Each structure stands twice: as structure tokens, then as C-alpha cells.
Amino acid sequence: MLENFILIQKEKLTEDIFLLNFKRENNKKIPLCGQFMTFLLPKSWGRAYSILDSDGENYFFIIKRLEEWRGGSKEICDTKIGTTYKAVGPAWHFILHKTEKNKLFLCTGTGFVPLYFQILWSLKEKLSCELKLIFWVREEKDIFLEDRLNILKKENNNFDYKIYLSREEKENYESWRITNFLTKENIANFEEFYICWNHDMIESVEEKLLELGIKQEQLFTEKF
Ligand SMILES: Cc1cc2nc3c(=O)[nH]c(=O)nc-3n(C[C@H](O)[C@H](O)[C@H](O)COP(=O)(O)OP(=O)(O)OC[C@H]3O[C@@H](n4cnc5c(N)ncnc54)[C@H](O)[C@@H]3O)c2cc1C
């Protein structure tokens, strides 16, 4: 069913990544962690966006404004506060499994979004399993919400994260690709793997994990 969503807050997190808070106008609906909404944008029509967090009324998103392509991301990132769009959802099955199995979250760029929601939910539900996020971006300037990750880490001794930079070397960050992290030793402790980003990234991460002896049924993926 189509619902009205009003943009009430917008923050620029990096040079091309925005945090948007849309208020669901009528009935409240709490999404499951990992789900997305589809916005019907006046010029670009349907575009799907994973939910970062929500109390059923405020829906937070992180969206990358892409200069090229068809323009949907520019349209939504350039939206003026107070604008109302129709949207449908929340939908989809990329949902965290409520188990006590140690979970590894692997993402690049805005693939962070559904995984962050899943981590928040695990912590709120007081799952005691180990939760680790591996977040890959190009350069230090592309990192977002690290302050929030730090707070989560300080407050929860079962959560940890590591940021990888693929295009520069910086103190405090790991260099090169996310797949470098995937060694037998590093994954030995984990039983569930949540992976989000584009087709190529998901394929290479899956391939590496399967090579290391992980079973297909332990892998959960979301493709943008
Ligand atoms: C289930 C689902 C959840 C999604 N959640 C998010 C989200 O939380 N945040 C978000 O920014 N986008 C998300 N997307 C992508 C989004 O729906 C649009 O594809 C994106 O905003 C680009 O739209 P566009 O019209 O500007 O470009 P399009 O013409 O649709 O561009 C398509 C090209 O851009 C690539 N692309 C899509 N998204 C990104 C991105 N974020 N960064 C770099 N390249 C990208 C695609 O792989 C494709 O090659 C999601 C997509 C799906 C299917």
C-alpha cells in the first residue's frame, strides 16, 4: 500500500552521501531489520532504499548521490525539507536471523545501511553472540557514521568493527580490499555471514567464503 513520507531532516555525511529522515505520515509500521522502502519519485519513478533505523514513524536512510546514471539518487538527495513522496514497504527478506550464532557483516559503501540496522537490532535484543562489521570504502573521506560505530563498540563488548580503505593508506585503518580480511583464521569464529553491496562484490566475497569451507546456507546477501 502506498503511504506518504515527508522529508523532515537531511544531513550531508560525506561529499556525496546523505542521511535522510522521512516521517511516515499516517499509520506507524516498524520495519524488520534489513528491509527496504521503495520511493516513487516524481521524475525517476521507483527506487529502493534500505532502512538504516526506524521507530515506525521516523525512517532513516543513507543515500549516495550518483552524478551519472538515471538520476534517481540525485532526485532523492536533492529533495527539499517538507517534500512528501509516496513510498511502498517495508519489504523483503534480507532479515537478520535471531540466533546466538556469531555473525560477520561485510559491506562496502552504502551497503552499510541494512547491516547497521541488523547490528542495532541484535544489540537492542541483547543477543550475546559476537557481532563484527567489516566496512570497506575508498578513502578516509568516504567513511561515515564512524562515531556511532565507536559508541556501539564502547557500549557493547560483543560488537567490533574494522574499516578498510582501498585507495589510500592511513593510520588506524586497514588497507586494501574487504576480501583481504577473509582468511581461515579471521572467519573461524563466525557462523552467519551478512553481505551487502553490488553484484561483483557479493560474488567475490561469496566465492572466497565458500573456498574457505563456509556453506551456502550460512550466507545472506542483499544486492543494490
Ligand atoms: C534492495 C535495495 C536497497 C538499496 N538501498 C540503497 C541504500 O540504502 N542507499 C543507496 O544509496 N542506494 C541503495 N540502493 C540503490 C538505489 O535503489 C538506486 O539504484 C541508486 O540510488 C541509484 O539510482 P540512480 O537512478 O541515481 O542510478 P541508476 O541509473 O539506477 O544507477 C544504476 C547504477 O548505479 C549503481 N549503484 C546503485 N546504488 C549505488 C550506490 N549506493 N553507490 C554506488 N553505485 C550504486 C548500480 O549498481 C548501477 O550500476 C538500493 C537498491 C536496492 C535494490
Image (spheres, rainbow, N blue to C red):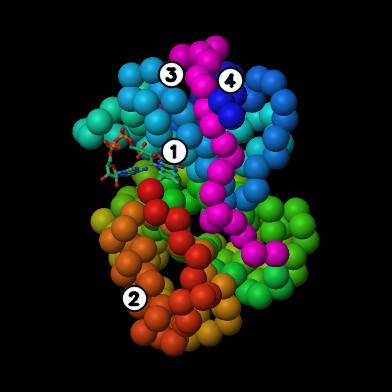
Which residue occupies 75% across, 69% down?
128
User: Label for residue 79?
Assistant: 3
Residue 197 image-quadrant placement: bottom left
Looking at the image, residue 189 sits to the left or right of residue 69; the answer is: right
Pointer 4: what residue? 4
User: In front: 94, or 138?
Assistant: 94
- Magenta residues (range): 76-98
Judge: label 1 CB < 8 Å from ligand 1.
yes
The amino acid type of the residue labelled 1 equals Ala
Label 4 neighbour load within 10 Å: few <14, some 14-19, many 20+: some
Secondary structure beneath dot 4 equals strand
Residue 153 point in image, percent of width and height: 64, 59
Pointer 2: what residue? 207
For marks 1 and 4, give the CA distance: 15 Å
User: Label for residue 48?
Assistant: 1
For marks 4 and 3, give the CA distance: 15 Å
| The stretch drawn in magenta includes residue 16 | no
Q: Earlier in the sequence, mark 1 or mark 3?
A: 1
Residue 80 point in image, percent of width and height: 46, 14
